[in-house]
């Protein structure tokens, strides 16, 4: 019985790090909208394990991508997870080629409460943030009554991502 449970956990974890066709379509739509383009390619970002060990967020071939249009890198996007009160939710952060946040979108929210963290109005607060900025709760990012855990979790994950992008940029990895 323990082996069966372990198998389900392993399969569940591996599936949680891949995106569905619906999520891929949503990401494509958001990137097309941000950059006002119809076609682009994405390329998984590959860095050395030495550099990856220094990063607050570990980069792999399923979470950080270059956005390429007409043979030029026009930006980057990150597909991540943050924790709500009882479950993870998925989000994306799109950066322009100057590493400024262009869009943040909650892709999948799995809880009954706190879903307001996915509202366009609330997420607009992140737009224009430089990778070198550290966001502060109630200064840069306002709270949402009933969604405090999700708000803080999202802000913390974005802060870790901003630190990660800054380190990658300083190491000339981008």
Image (cartoon, grey):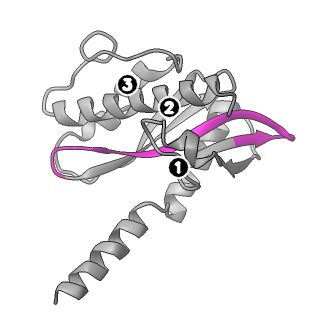
* Farthest residue, direction top: 139
Q: Secondary structure at mark 2?
A: helix
Query: Which of the two labelled residues, at mark 2 and mark 3, occupies the earlier sequence position?
Result: 3
* Farthest residue, direction front: 50
- Which residue lies under the disc numbered 1? 63
Q: Is residue 80 left or right of residue 139?
A: right
Q: Which segment is the magenta one?
A: 67-86
| Cα gap from disc 1 to disc 2, whole angstroms | 12 Å
Please state which of residues 168 and 13 is positioned toward the viewer in this rendering.
Answer: 168
Using a 10 Å C-alpha cutoff, classify the residue at mark 1 as few (fewer than 14 neighbours), some (14 to 19) or many (20 or more): some
- Image coordinates of residue 120 in percent, x first then y, are 40, 30
- Which residue lies under the disc numbered 3? 121
Q: Nearer the viewer, mark 3 or mark 1?
A: 1
Task: Provide the major secondary structure of the magenta segment.
Answer: strand
* Farthest residue, direction left: 146
Using a 10 Å C-alpha cutoff, classify the residue at mark 2 as few (fewer than 14 neighbours), some (14 to 19) or many (20 or more): many
Residue at horizontal 70%, vertical 41%?
67
Q: Is residue 172 left or right of residue 57?
A: right
- Which residue lies under the disc numbered 2? 164
Where, by quadrant of the figure, is residue 110 drawn? bottom left
Q: Secondary structure at mark 3?
A: helix
Please state which of residues 110 and 140 is positioned toward the viewer in this rendering.
Answer: 140
Residue at horizontal 49%, vertical 17%?
129
- Image coordinates of residue 122 in percent, x first then y, are 34, 25
Query: Which of the two labelled residues, at mark 3 and mark 1, occupies the earlier sequence position?
Result: 1
Q: Is residue 2 left or right of residue 116?
A: left
Residue at horizontal 55%, vertical 52%?
60
| Cα gap from disc 2 to disc 3, whole angstroms | 26 Å
Using a 10 Å C-alpha cutoff, classify the residue at mark 3 as few (fewer than 14 neighbours), some (14 to 19) or many (20 or more): few
């Amino acid at each position: 019985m323990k082996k069966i449970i372990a198998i389900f956990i392993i399969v569940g974890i591996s599936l949680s790090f891949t995106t569905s066709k619906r999520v891929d379509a949503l990401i494509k739509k958001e990137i097309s909208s941000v950059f006002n383009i119809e076609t682009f390619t994405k390329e998984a970002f590959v860095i050395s394990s030495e550099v990856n060990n220094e990063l607050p967020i570990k980069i792999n071939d399923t979470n950080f991508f270059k956005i390429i249009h007409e043979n030029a890198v026009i930006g980057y996007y990150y597909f991540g997870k943050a924790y709500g009160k009882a479950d993870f939710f998925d989000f994306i952060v799109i950066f322009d080629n100057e590493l400024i946040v262009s869009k943040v979108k909650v892709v999948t929210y799995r809880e009954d409460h706190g879903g307001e963290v996915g509202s366009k109005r609330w997420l607009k607060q992140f737009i224009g943030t430089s990778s070198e900025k550290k966001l502060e709760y109630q200064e840069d990012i306002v709270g949402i009554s009933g969604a405090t855990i999700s708000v803080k979790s999202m802000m913390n994950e974005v802060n870790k991502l901003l630190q990660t992008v800054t380190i990658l940029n300083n190491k000339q990895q981008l």
